[in-house]
Image: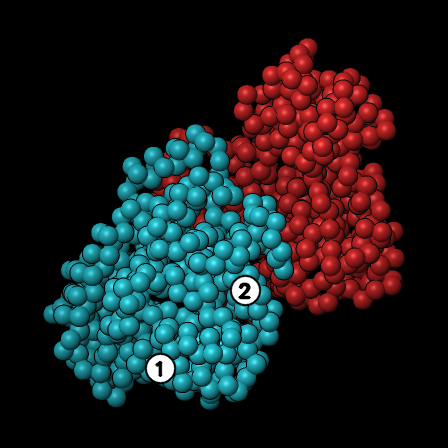
Chain colours: A cyan, B red
Amino acid sequence: MSEGTLALLGGAPAFESAVPVGQLYFPDWPDYVEAMRGIFVRQYYTNQGPLVRELESALQERLGVRHAICVANATIGLMMAADALGLRGRVITSAFSFIATSQSLTWAGLDPLFCDVDASSHHLDPDRVEHALRQEDVSAVLAVNLWGDVCDHEALSRLAARRGVPLYFDSAHAFGCEAGARAVGGFGALEVFSFHATKVLSAAEGGCVCTNDDMLAARLRNIRSSYGAGAPVHVRRTANGRMSEAQAAIALMSLKGFPSILERNRALFAAYEAGLQSVQGLRLLRPAAVNRTNYQYVVCEIDAGVFGLDRDQLHAVLRAENILARRYFYPGIHRCMPYREQFPSAPADLPVTEVLCSRVLQLPIGQAVDEAAVARITAVVRAAQTNAQLVRAVLAGQGEVHA
Amino acid sequence: MSEGTLALLGGAPAFESAVPVGQLYFPDWPDYVEAMRGIFVRQYYTNQGPLVRELESALQERLGVRHAICVANATIGLMMAADALGLRGRVITSAFSFIATSQSLTWAGLDPLFCDVDASSHHLDPDRVEHALRQEDVSAVLAVNLWGDVCDHEALSRLAARRGVPLYFDSAHAFGCEAGARAVGGFGALEVFSFHATKVLSAAEGGCVCTNDDMLAARLRNIRSSYGAGAPVHVRRTANGRMSEAQAAIALMSLKGFPSILERNRALFAAYEAGLQSVQGLRLLRPAAVNRTNYQYVVCEIDAGVFGLDRDQLHAVLRAENILARRYFYPGIHRCMPYREQFPSAPADLPVTEVLCSRVLQLPIGQAVDEAAVARITAVVRAAQTNAQLVRAVLAGQGEVHA
């Protein structure tokens, strides 16, 4: 397609079938069948079975943390985390994240206090957090590690310690990353990973809470299984956060294949860098605060004035080519229920978040693409820029496009 | 063992390996492999995939309900249900249930108002509910359908309607049951099933919320996928309650095999009836309010004065034989956190629940036993009664036994 006509302008789509953004790496079929046969032979299907225990040990060793507590999904992990930390009232967090970050607080009976993010890194701005910690009564800081990168955890750690509140992390995007030569997973009071199918380590659905705090770990285990498989530690309430053996089996195989997944992602990311380096008005985010990333996302920021199209217009071009680029995070959490009613002034209070929600676009990386596909995707982006005027005219004719 | 010595008294255990109480029916291996291969070919692993949609259609047809909304587990289903119903304040429920019933309310920001149960049926006593509805400010009634039976849903329905509050059901124990020739699943505002591995329909982990209310269904779907796969309906908050394709595959196969599962359970239950009919002081519960049960549980009530041993003593005898009988529900929800602090007077206010928590014992049924095993289990029970005096002496020598 690199030389052809954009699909939006009447050409054939660059891809015959839809190309998703998620990682979607899955184990080899024979390995999978063997693992599942083991579960059938043992007839042990869920609730802290042998594969979950094996996965937890492997994660603990890999991440260098005392406790890796596997859960049904990261959302329930974040909900359990807020409860296990015994939080009350408000928690500082970012509105530039997947909605589960804040929803976990709401389920735990807490309110988010949104702080704006840094325009360059997309992560919580320590200056804004410092200001909020000085002005407001909060019980914790829930920082988000985005895009295979990490927030300014050292600054946030100092600020939280000075105020005497815990700092914990939604690290759904950051499995396999290292900051200061330390594996993400061991920072703060705890960290929560997602092992969703779209993530670099997959259990189809799943997640994990990591901590070095023995008492927190005991509480988390007790919450996870409705008191069913934990020490009799006082907890505020319990849930069903159990990971099944089938989930653990997939994650274990995903962990085994992790080096090759990373290597493949790295090559795909390099192909994006090569294909997009000449594109004016498009900034490809390069994880800057880690010494090792997982290349989980390819994130672009579109400066409409320079690029010639705004983010939504480029998104429409890509969708027409069957490239399922995602406007992440759109709308921002502060514009979703219940927060848009709870905090009507948030759009004004979060100017950087507002801008990013209108400019950021995620491109496909992972199992669904190879280097040739990336070359076609970057060619589409370049062609969109070249044909910007025509694209704008066609879209204006169609009315607003929100695919 | 029927003629041998009880293991507690020095004999060999009746079973070489542990016999669990749960159903633990699983599909045939070739069927399972074929289903999983389909998932791999489609590369669609979670979030309302084709198998989840197929399962939901099959459940809707079987149960005669407009909406069957599959979820990650029943606990999250109950939490979502409380939110989707828009409840506030207190909800009448039973403390004689699995703890998730009440914990779902606590996560949803609600408080349980425990009403006592009927001594014969073990289900909510309508007289107590009527009294509470008259005296207290409540926003709903959450009734539990226990042991493959149902509560007095007609009386509760009248009472709730008169007071203008919704009635909904924790039907974790009641999939496949019929009351008044209507399938359980279509009663009240909604019903929540569990498809845990121990249940008669299994997804290893899983559950389902059933309702005939289109607006409720739209809210539930929206809550389930973090706004990700639902109509844009106003909801208070969202969660990750997604069922994965692998879970749906197991449940579909379980549904296909359901007639034979029921038939097998029925025969096992009949074997228990035959083996225990002569035992004085042991009441085997027969589901009385349904015209069709699922035989999911074999529940006995032990009258220590007549039987010769109390429930905990019989439990110790069975455990020594490798029969993993369960003291369900022990302790009662009202004696678990946070309720024992929240409602210190509950033990006095719930005299029937208190008695049942000390007298009820669950025996193994399902995949792990056959009729010969049931004959050995009932022989152990009879031998325990015959040797009651000796058993009491041995246990007294060991100190209190709480296996």
Residue found 52% across the figure and 36% down from its top: B254
The number of numbered discs placed on residues in the rendered structure image is: 2
The residue under label 2 is: A85
Q: Is residue B372 left or right of residue A92?
A: right
Q: Position of residue B311 (x, y in %)?
A: 75, 32
Q: Quadrant of the N terminus of chain B?
A: top right
**Residue A95 visible to an observer of this rendering:** no
Q: Position of residue A34 (x, y in %)?
A: 34, 34
User: B58 above or below A129?
Assistant: above
Mark earlier in primary sequence (1, 2):
2
The residue under label 1 is: A118
The quadrant in which residue B282 appears is: top right
What amino acid does circle 1 point to?
A: Asp
Q: Is residue B106 left or right of residue B229?
A: right
The circle on residue A358 is none
Outermost left residue: A3
- Chain under label 2? A
Q: Is residue A388 left or right of residue A68?
A: left
